[in-house]
Amino acid sequence: MDRIFSEDIFNPAFVLEGPHLVAASAGTGKTHNIQNIYARLVAEKGFRTSQIQVMTFTEKATKELRDRVRKVLADLSRLFAGDVAGFKPEELERLEKLRACAQATIGGESPDTVARMRIDLALMEFDQAAISTIHGFCRRALVRFAFETDVNPRCD
């Protein structure tokens, strides 16, 4: 493999649709990869937070992931609005890569405006984002489809 997965994400040709399994040991960039895929799905494809499912193993990892995804969306909104004050050079470089992907994918006369509107909508809806542990996802699915699964939604 001549390129690492983390850098492939910044290629506008990287396939965003469909499932992505990001499996690796601690400290290998899983959260980095997930937050960038999430940001691209929102900015480029216009996915709503309710259309993206992210699962991880622990409550701690879920909280970190939610915080990081929200931060990258907020940072991108600022960047698309022209506010680059206070970003560290490495943060700005990553955000500019995401911006370049959005510009290449959206096209037209105002891709920054389109991307920013999508990101701002995602930030408004972020409390409904489906970022959870695997067991949290299963519980929600069983409650949502209680009749189909013959499960009492009030049982814990």
Image (cartoon, rainbow, N blue to C red):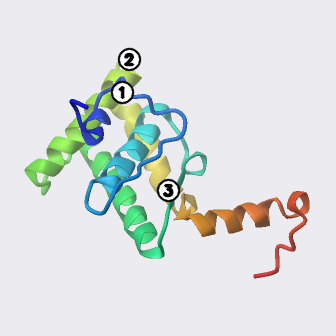
Asked if disc 2 and disc 1 are in contact, CB closer than 8 Å, the reply is yes
Residue 20 shown left or right of residue 98 in the figure: right
Q: Quadrant of residue 134?
A: bottom right
State whether residue 17 is above or below residue 39: above
Asked if disc 3 and disc 1 are in contact, CB closer than 8 Å, the reply is no
Q: Quadrant of residue 66?
A: bottom left
What's the CA distance linking mark 3 and mark 2? 25 Å
- Decide: few, some or many residues near mark 1? Use Cα within 10 Å; few <14, some 14-19, many ≥20: many
User: What's the residue at 21%, 30% (across, down)?
Assistant: 2
The local secondary structure at tag 3 comes to helix
What's the CA distance linking mark 3 and mark 1? 20 Å
Where in the figure is residue 100, as x and y percent of width and height? 26, 29
The quadrant of the image that shows the N terminus is top left
Residue 141 shown left or right of residue 64 in the figure: right
Where in the figure is residue 130, as x and y percent of width and height? 56, 58
Task: Point out the tag, 3 or 2, that comes first from the N-terminus.
Answer: 2
* Disc sitting over residue 111 in the figure: 1
Where in the figure is residue 42, as x and y percent of width and height? 46, 41
Q: Quadrant of residue 65?
A: bottom left
State whether residue 136 is above or below residue 156: above
The local secondary structure at tag 2 comes to loop
Residue type beneath disc 3 = Met
Q: Which residue is mark 2?
A: 108
What's the CA distance linking mark 2 and mark 1? 6 Å
The quadrant of the image that shows the C terminus is bottom right
Q: Which residue is mark 3?
A: 124
Residue 12 shown left or right of residue 2 in the figure: right
Residue type beneath disc 2 = Gly
Is residue 38 something one can see in this rendering?
yes
Residue type beneath disc 1 = Pro
